[in-house]
Amino acid sequence: MHDLFIFYDIHSRLYGKIKTVCPTGYPMVRVQTKNISGGDYSVRYGLIKKANFISRPNRFTAHVLLDGREEMVHVRNTGRCREILKEGTPVILEASKNPLRKTGYSLISAYKGDRLINIDSQVPNAVVQEALKASQINEFGSLQAVLREVTYGNSRFDLYFEDKEKKGFIEVKGVTLEVDGTAMFPDAPTERGAKHVMEMVKAVEGGFLGYILFLIQMDGVHCFTPNRKMDGRFASALCYAEERGVKILAYDSHVTENEITIGSPVKVIL
């Protein structure tokens, strides 16, 4: 067991959503941590159903053909996904456990030819967190702590990690756009994306390690590159961040209809 000194919201729990604030003046809490490597590191879904995509009237919902009838479902991704969600495309739905919800299912993945692409924008952080806990990302090795939704100064990052020799932050970006074997981010202009990258530069300047990790939510891609045509500002920010010491990583994923697991490193071309 090891002692880790952090500032955190006492109503949160370790490995859950933890708000960490680094400036002085906040009460310091001693948290006992343990080595968290090993174990199963897949993220699994509950009850799933197959359907066919019909249309998407807005960012949040879609119409699908399910068991011979048209059904409105929640789309767990507010991005465009136009290259994926086309009429007739086979899609995978997860049944909701909330009987009061307006939609009974969430659209979590879709086929593009023979390739299944997970489009769930809520899952990348969990996939990376589980992989870190199981020591499945070579750049980090075995860690003592992995914390979610961590605040540093005026910035909030997806993950904080620490062991005896290093500590730092990770911003995770889910990638669903693929063109001719190249994975790209973003698929739509994103002001927040460039902002997050520049905030990571500040964390590195403050003495922390900083990583931007692109989780490609499919397998079979050859490389990753920022989508300059869609958002040149984000691409420029990413190049600047690398020059300032932020590490840029990309990993693909093993995707099945009810599971997603981190895969192998993918070449990054900036």
Image: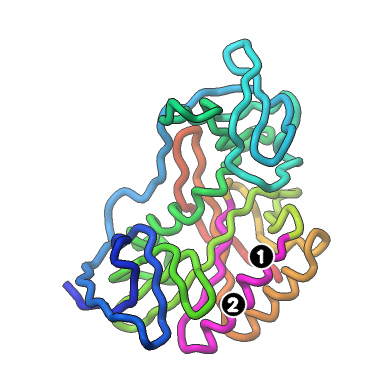
Mark 2, Cα crowd under 10 Å, few <14 / some 14-19 / many 20+, is: many
Mark positioned earlier in the residue sequence (2 or 1)? 1
Across and down, in percent, residue 149 comes to 45, 64
Instruction: Determine which residue is flagged by label 1.
Output: 192
- Is 208 in front, or is 10? 10
Apparent side of residue 202 relative to residue 85 in the rendered image (left or right): left
Q: Is residue 95 magenta?
A: no
Residue 36, given in percent of the width and then of the height, sits at 27, 63
Neighbor class of circle 1 (other Cα within 10 Å; few <14, some 14-19, many 20+) is few
Q: CA distance from mark 2 to mark 1?
A: 10 Å
From this view, report whether residue 94 is shown above or below residue 268: above
What residue span does the magenta drawing correspond to? 190-216
Q: Could you tell me the amino acid type at mark 1?
A: Arg
Q: How is the image coloured?
A: rainbow
Q: Which residue is the site of mark 2?
A: 199
Q: In which quadrant will I find the C terminus?
A: bottom right
Q: Amino acid at mark 2?
A: Glu
**Residue at (50%, 45%) from the top-left corner?**
254
Left or right relative to 84: residue 123: left
